[in-house]
Image (tube, grey):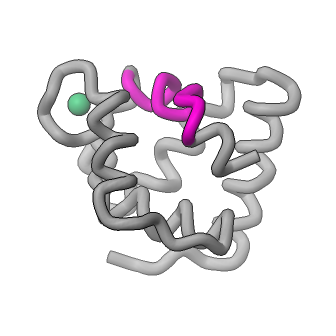
Amino acid sequence: MADLSAEEVQRVKDLLNSFYVNGDSSVVAELFGIIDRDGSGSLEADELEPIITAVTGKQLGAGELEAIIKAADEDGNSTIELNEFEGLLNNAQVKALLT
Ligand SMILES: [Ca+2]
């Protein structure tokens, strides 16, 4: 799994800014595509963790990311699909972390 390039991290920051500051939901799919490194159509914890760290410079505590995923994981399969991803972004804890 390739690491995120500096350009990708910057793009993610720009997209998050559009989403949170301008309320632009049209960026959600592009954001999802960048984070979904293996192109599986779902985001796993090991794909979400590096992007959160790259964007915030913070390391999530054990169980923290698990709880965030669980809160947004509507079908309970332990991964985040595109239809669940906007809910994850709107999670109060995630929003506080990323903005
Ligand atoms: Ca799911």
Q: Is residue 62 above or below residue 92?
A: below
Q: Which residue is at a point 81% across and 42% down the rendered structure image?
A: 17
Q: Is residue 33 magenta?
A: no
Residue 94 lies in quadrant: top right
Residue 86 is situated, as x and y percent measured from the top left of the image, at 52, 26
The main secondary structure of the magenta stretch is helix
Q: How many marks?
A: 0
- Ligand 1: which quarter? top left
Q: Which of 25/70 is in front?
A: 70
Q: Which residue is at a point 53% across and 63% down the rendered structure image?
A: 51
Q: Which of 4/44 is in front?
A: 44
Q: Is residue 90 magenta?
A: yes
Residue 67 relative to residue 88: left or right: left
Residue 98 relative to residue 85: left or right: right
Q: Which of 32/54 is in front?
A: 54
Residue reaching furthest to the left: 77
Residue range of the region highlighted in magenta in the rendering? 84-93
Residue 1 is situated, as x and y percent measured from the top left of the image, at 32, 76
Q: Which residue is at a point 55% across and 61% down the rendered structure image?
A: 52
